[in-house]
Structure formats: C-alpha cells, structure tokens
Image: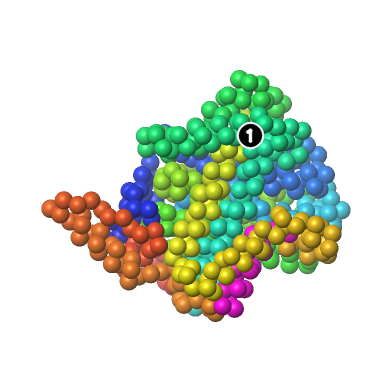
Amino acid sequence: MARVAARLSTDGKQSTHPVDEVLPLPKLALYGFQHVLAFYAGAVIVPIIVGSALKLSPEQLVYLINADLFTCGIASIIQAWGIGRIGARLPLIQGVTFTAVSPMIAIGLGAGGGTAALLVIYGAVITAGIATFAFAWLPAKAFRTVMRLFPPVVTGTVITVLGIVLIPVGLNDAAGGLGSPDFGEPKNFAYAGGTMLFILILMKLGKPFLSSIAILLGLVVGTGVAFLLGDAKFGDVGNSDWIGVTTPFHFGVPKFEWFPIVLMLIVMLITMVETTGDTYAVGDIVGKEVDSETVARALRADGAATALGGVLNSFPYVAFAENVGLVRMTKVKSRFVVVAAGVFMIVLGLLPKAAAIVAAVPHGVLGGAATVMFAMVALAGIQTLGKVDLKEEKNALIVGVSLAFALLPATVPVFFTKHMDADLSSLLNSGVTLGATAAIVLNLIFNGMAKDNAHDAPEAGARALAEAEADTAPGSGATAPEVPAAVPAQAASPAPSAEKADDADPTPSPSAP
C-alpha cells in the first residue's frame, strides 16, 4: 500500500522520480543545477538588499553573497538528506527568508550600519536559531498542541500568500530589476515573455525529460539570446577571485542585544509557519507522509541552519517556497536532487567566479522563469485550501481577510514608513508576516484549536488507496486511478511508510506523535 502511495502524485500522475530514489549522476547534476538557478535570485537578493542598506563595500557584499550560498548548500543537504532526527528528508531547498529583511535592516541601522551592525544582527540570528532548534524538540504532546494552530486553512493561506507576495518579485525582475537604469524597458519584458513562452512550450510539447528541465533550459536559452544581443554581461567573471573561503565570525565576534533578539525571535515564529506549510505542501506533491515529527525535523533543520548562518556570516533560513513550485512543475521528486543542489551551492560559495557566471543571467530572463514558479507556489497553496470547506463562511472569511492583510504593505507602504514607529514597522511591513498572523488569529477566533493531526484524513486516504490497489491488482487490466488532490497522500496508508521505517531512530522519539 505504501508503495502505491509513494508512486502517485496528488494530481493523479505517476511520479517521475519518487522521493527516495537516487538518480544517475548526470540527472542528479542536471536537476540539481536547475534548482540552484531557480532559487539563485532569491538566495542572493537578501544579502544584496541588507548589505546595500548597511553601506557595505563591494568586497564585503561579495563576501556576504558567497557566505550565503555556502551556508544554503549545507542547510539544504541537512534538510533533504537528514542527520539523525534533523531534516525532513524531503526535496526542500533552504534559503534566507525574505521575512527577516526589514527587521535586519532596522537592527543594522539602529546599530549604526557597516560591519558593526552585522555583529548585532548575527547575535540575534544565532540566538533565534538556537531557540527554534530547541522549540522543535518539545515533548510530543506540547509540540502537537502548537501544530494544532496550523490546520489546512492556515497553512494553505500562508502558502498562497507566499506565492502572491513573491509574484511581484518575479515581475520586478521581469521589468529589469528594481533600481536598474533600464527598469521597465520593453526589452526586459521581451526577454521575460520569451523565456516564459519557451518554458511553457517545453512543458506542453516536450518529452518528460525536457519538461522536467524546462526552467533550466529557459534560463540558458534566454541568457544565450541576451548575450548575442549584447544584454548579458560576463565582465565581472574576470574580475572575481577563483577561491573565496567562508570563515566563522569573519566580521568579528557577534553582539547579543535584547531588542534585536526579540525581533528575530518573532521573525522565526513566522518562518516556522512558512516551513510548516511548505513541508505539508511538498509532502502532498511527492506523496510522502507528513506528520508532526516530520514537521519537527524540518524545523530543527531551520533552527540549525539559522544558528549556523549567524556563525558563517549569513542570515535566518527557511524552506524555500520557490523550489516547492519547481518540484510541482517538474514532478522530479527525489530528495537527492536537492542534495546535489546543495553541493552545487557549496561549490558556488567557494568559487566567486562560478557565482559570477550564474549572476550574469539577465533580470528579464530570470523574472520570466521566476514568475512561472511563484505562480505555482500560489497554486500549491490553493491546492492545500482544496482540503478546506470554503463553502463554510468562516473559512472563506479567514482566507479572504488574510489575503487582504497580506497585500497591505505593497498597496499602502506609506502607512508603515510614515505613520508607524520604526521598530514596529520593521516587523509588520511584510505581507507574509501580516497574512500569516491574520490567518492564525482569525482561525482561532472562528474555529478554535484544530483537532490533532489536522492535515490527516486517514479514512478517505485509506479508501482511495484501497481502490488504487484493487484497480491495479493482477488481471484487473486497469491502471492506477487518480488520488484526489484534496486527500493528503501521506494519509493513504495507516501503516508507516517504508522510508519512515528505514529512517526511524532506534530510540523512542520524545516528540514523535
């Protein structure tokens, strides 16, 4: 039974590569590199924004980017491969969270900017990472109680908010990148539209293998066309060093101040909601059981990566929703592809020249590909909301009002910049923060605490799987039926999955459900 569930995706199509399949090295490398390109802009934009706001030198900014990539690689390997009871063992890429950008800038400017500001930020990041790691080791009963705050109406709303908030990021890239002198020029939209069209054609007409690397091919072909037309510049490659090693506490010993720590702890609460939603979403996509212990392992990886980020001159980490969209698009579900992507990121973090080549992808090309992926993130959230009875008015209100709150910072930014205390603005001026908070609070008001294991539907799942086995029994002459998208694939078998049995720790888990 578990084998049938593992090989069916939530949209009824067979998985190209199941979650625990180790692919041949060429495919691992190709699919892994596609993940790197898909997440690259999101990965480097945070250190660029924060470093620029703190008035760091170009050399210091390059160092931040390399440190970020290096730590992203380690964090992604921990999350996808798993170390003991740390890491979800799902195809989840770890990246620096956008939620932390405004708070970190506020902390840094309050500390006077420059590298001195980084030391205060890193003190808060390390503390918040350790706190998140410790939280995920809560006893089973306490952890399950907390997880009851995140039923599908909450996690689905948060994932949808993430996609909606990220789509403008992709569109800004499609326009040429905010702050660039040619922002809004028609040629940028031409590159974005051409890249998007190429990707969609491959997805529609290409063979399964070509469809699975459509994003990568779109970026390569778009960059090639831009280079031929003189709009892709590789001059920075020659100016970059060959080797750039990230060392702990490069900028000095971190400083631990109470207000930055409190601010970063609140940021990590929001990122825990993001990671929880992404874990359930990718579990549905790959057809693997996700329970409270899986979520706890994912959050432990977040905490460990965040604490490590503070040590290695980087920032808070979260499971990247962008790459959840990529998994859904390509249907390449092997977690070892993310491990390969982690290796690539470590290499890029050590080789500034290699990172400079990837950085040469024009904004327009990157924006075309990113917009497609971010839209798929929103769709993953809508798919999770498919488990929710939206005909029930209170659920509809939770989703609708939360989306409205999420759009407030982008729609009325002046409210946060001119009419709010700077410290409070640094926390609330985020669509993800407002949308997630609204979803949690409104759900508590209208629905109260969810039942235990709110994401599970064991009876419906078992029934769907029983039908699948009956229809695919020898002599039946039938193919595997579709598993309804509204039924979590992880609920399809009441028995533990083979992967879980293989990975189980011989000692009882204090936080196991």
Amino acid type, residue under disc 1 in the picture: Phe
Q: Quadrant of the N terminus?
A: bottom left
Taking the image as shown, residue 275 lies to the left or right of residue 332, namely: right
| Residue 434 colored in magenta in the image | yes
Visible residue check, residue 296: no
Q: Residue at x 38, y 63 (%)?
A: 487
Q: How is the image coloured?
A: rainbow
Q: Quadrant of the C terminus?
A: bottom left
Please rate how many residues cluster around mark 1, counting C-alpha atoms within 10 Å: few if below 14, some from 14 to 19, many from 20: many
| Front-lying residue, 160 or 40 | 160
| Front-lying residue, 154 or 300 | 154
Q: Quadrant of residue 472?
A: bottom left
Q: Position of residue 260 (x, y in %)?
A: 77, 63
Q: Quadrant of residue 299?
A: bottom right
Q: Dot 1 lies on which element? A: helix
Q: Position of residue 48 (x, y in %)?
A: 72, 43
| Residue 259 colored in magenta in the image | no
Q: Residue at x 46, y 58 (%)?
A: 383
Q: Position of residue 353 (x, y in %)?
A: 64, 30
Q: Position of residue 54 (x, y in %)?
A: 81, 48
| Front-lying residue, 269 or 393 | 393
Visible residue check, residue 34: yes
In this picture, which residue range is highlighted in magenta?
Answer: 429-446
In the depicted structure, whether residue 235 falls above or below residue 62 = above
> What secondary structure is the magenta-colored segment mainly?
helix
Q: Residue at x 66, y 29 (%)?
A: 187
Residue ID for mark 1: 189
